[in-house]
Image (cartoon, helix red, strand yellow):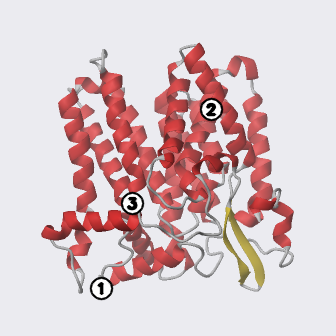
C-alpha cells in the first residue's frame, strides 16, 4: 500500500494532514485551564477581540490574532484557545512533507520527514497550547517550501511564487521576531544558489529577487499591525509605527529574572532541561504536560546531522549538506540572539528541521541501511506512545505519577 501511495504524493499529503489533525486535536481540551504561557497569550487574544488597548506588546500581533480567531469560532474555552494551534500544527506537518518533497523529489523521504516531525513530540505539544510557536513553525516551513518551489519552477510563475515566499516569511516575523534570521538566510541562499545558474528562480535578477523578498516580507509584517490602529485606548498611528518597533526591541532584550526552566542553547539538542508546561490537579485527576522531544528523533537526529555533514563534505552531496547547514544555522542563531534567558521551546524550529535531516540521511544512505528506516519509525512510534500520557495531559495514577518518565534528574 505504501508503494502505491508513493506514486500519489498529493493524496499522501492530504492523508498526512488529516492524520496530524486528528492526532493533535483529540483531547485538546485537556487541561481545562490555562497552562504555561497561555496565561500571556490568551488574555492578549481576549483584548484583541475587544480592541480595547495594547497588551503583550513585546511580540508582534499575528500569532495572537490567530488565537483570537479560534476563540471567536469556538468560544473562550480550551478548544477555542488551542484550535488554531492544532490547525497550524497539522499544516506544519504537511509543510514538512512538501518541503522535503521539493528538496529531494522523493515521496518516501518526504513521508518519513513528515512522520518524524509528527512523532517528534515538539510539534504535537505546541499544536495543543495557545502559544505563538505553532504559527511560527507553520509560516517558516511553508516559506521554505515556497523557496524551493520558486527555485525549481519556470520563469512565468517565479515572481508570483517568490512573492508568496516573501509573504510567508513576513507572516512568520509577524508572529515572532525569531523568524528574522530565516529571512536573511533565504536572501543569502538566493544569491548563492542563483550564482552561475541563471535558470534557477525563473531567471530572476539578484536585485529584483531581493526587492521582492524584502519588500514583500516587510510589507506583510507591517500590515499585520492594522488592528492596533483601531484600539479604543492608545491606538497605534503611522507616526508611531516605527518607534513602536523600538519599544518592542527594548522589551525583547530586557534583562529578565532567573527562571526555573531556563537553559542554554547548546543544551537543547541534548534535551537536558525540558519544561513542564502543566502539572497539577484538573478535572478530578493529576495531569501533566511535559515539553520534551522524542529521544529517538532528537538524539538520533544528531547522528543524522553528522552523517549529512560527512556526506556533504566528503562526498560532495548537495542535499545532505544543505539540510545539515540549515539545522546548524537554526540552532546557531540562538548563540547570537540577544536574549537574557533561553528555554527549550526555542528549539522548536531546529527540532522540526531535525526530522528533515533524519529523512534525508536515511534516503542518502539507503543502500547501506536498506529498509531500516521502517524499523526506526517503529521505535519512534513506541517512544511516542510511551510519553503520550505526559504529552496529552492524561490522568496520572498519583501525585507522583510523573516519576515514571523521569530518566534524568534535570527532567523533573
The furthest residue to the left: 239
Which of the two labelled residues, at mark 3 and mark 1, occupies the earlier sequence position?
1
Contact between labelled residues 1 and 3, with CB atoms less than 8 Å apart: no
- Residue 5 visible in the snapshot: no
Left or right of 177 on screen, residue 21:
right
Vertical order, 73 against 4 (above or below):
below
Q: Nearer the viewer, residue 181 or 12?
A: 181
Query: Residue 143: x, y in percent?
Result: 39, 44
- Pointer 1: residues within 10 angstroms few (<14), some, or many (20+)? some
Q: Which residue is mark 1?
A: 52
Judged from the image, the secondary structure of the residue bearing numbered disc 1 is loop
Location of residue 60 with respect to 354 vertically, above or below: below
Residue 380 location in percent, x, y?
75, 45
Q: Which residue is mark 3?
A: 175
Total numbered badges shown on the rendered structure: 3
> Rounded to the nearest whole Å, what is the CA distance between mark 2 and mark 1?
48 Å
Query: Could you tell me if the residues under marks 3 and 2 are in contact, i.e. CB atoms within 8 Å?
Result: no
Cβ atoms at labels 2 and 1 below 8 Å apart: no
Q: In the image, is residue 206 above or below residue 59?
A: above
Q: Give the residue pinned by disc 2.
A: 305
Name the quadrant containing residue 60.
bottom left
Query: Percent x, y for residue 284?
Result: 76, 86
**Local SS, label 2:** helix
Q: Is residue 11 left or right of residue 254?
A: right
Question: Residue 63's spot in the image, x, y percent?
Answer: 40, 65
User: Sequence order check: which comes first, mark 2 or mark 1?
Assistant: 1
Amino acid at each position: 500500500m505504501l508503494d502505491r501511495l508513493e506514486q500519489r504524493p498529493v493524496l499522501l499529503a492530504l492523508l498526512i494532514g488529516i492524520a496530524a489533525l486528528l492526532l493533535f486535536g483529540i483531547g485538546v481540551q485537556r487541561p481545562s485551564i490555562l497552562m504555561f504561557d497561555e496565561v500571556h497569550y490568551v488574555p492578549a487574544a481576549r483584548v484583541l477581540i475587544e480592541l480595547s488597548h495594547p497588551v503583550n506588546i513585546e511580540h508582534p500581533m499575528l500569532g495572537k490574532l490567530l488565537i483570537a480567531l479560534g476563540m471567536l469560532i469556538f468560544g473562550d474555552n480550551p478548544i477555542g484557545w488551542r484550535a488554531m494551534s492544532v490547525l497550524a500544527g497539522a499544516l506544519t506537518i504537511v509543510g514538512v512533507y512538501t518541503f522535503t518533497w521539493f528538496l529531494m523529489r522523493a515521496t518516501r523521504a518526504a513521508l518519513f520527514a513528515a512522520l518524524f516531525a509528527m512523532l517528534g513530540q515538539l510539534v504535537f505539544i505546541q499544536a495543543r497550547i495557545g502559544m505563538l510557536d505553532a504559527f511560527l513553525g507553520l509560516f517558516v516551513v511553508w516559506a521554505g517550501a515556497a523557496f524551493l518551489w520558486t527555485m525549481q519552477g519556470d520563469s512565468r510563475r517565479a515572481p508570483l511564487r517568490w512573492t508568496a515566499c516573501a509573504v510567508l516569511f513576513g507572516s512568520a516575523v509577524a508572529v515572532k521576531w525569531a523568524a528574522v534570521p530565516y529571512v536573511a538566510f533565504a536572501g543569502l541562499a538566493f544569491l548563492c544558489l542563483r550564482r552561475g545558474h541563471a535558470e534557477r528562480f525563473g531567471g530572476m535578477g539578484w536585485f529584483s529577487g531581493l526587492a521582492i523578498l524584502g519588500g514583500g516580507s516587510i510589507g506583510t509584517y507591517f500590515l499585520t499591525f492594522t488592528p492596533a490602529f483601531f484600539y479604543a485606548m492608545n491606538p497605534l498611528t503611522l507616526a508611531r509605527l516605527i518607534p513602536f518597533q523600538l519599544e518592542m526591541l527594548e522589551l525583547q532584550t530586557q534583562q529578565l529574572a532567573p527562571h526555573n526552566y531556563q537553559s542554554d542553547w547548546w543544551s537543547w539538542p541534548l534535551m537536558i532541561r525540558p519544561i513542564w508546561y502543566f502539572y497539577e490537579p484538573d478535572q478530578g485527576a493529576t495531569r501533566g504536560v511535559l515539553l520534551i522531544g522524542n529521544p529517538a528523533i532528537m538524539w538520533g537526529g544528531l547522528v543524522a546531522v553528522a552523517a549529512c555533514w560527512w556526506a556533504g563534505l566528503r562526498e560532495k552531496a548537495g542535499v545532505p549538506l544543505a539540510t545539515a547547514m540549515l539545522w546548524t544555522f537554526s540552532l546557531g542563531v540562538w548563540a547570537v540572539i540577544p536574549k537574557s534567558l533561553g528555554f527549550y521551546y526555542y528549539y522548536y524550529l531546529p527540532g522540526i528541521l531535525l526530522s528533515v535531516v533524519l529523512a534525508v540521511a536515511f534516503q542518502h544512505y539507503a543502500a547501506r541501511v536498506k529498509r531500516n528506516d521502517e524499523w526506526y519509525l517503529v521505535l519512534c512510534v513506541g517512544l511516542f506512545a510511551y510519553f503520550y500520557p505526559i504529552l496529552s495531559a492524561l490522568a496520572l495514577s498519583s501525585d507522583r505519577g510523573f516519576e515514571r518518565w523521569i530518566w534524568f534528574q534535570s527532567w523533573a
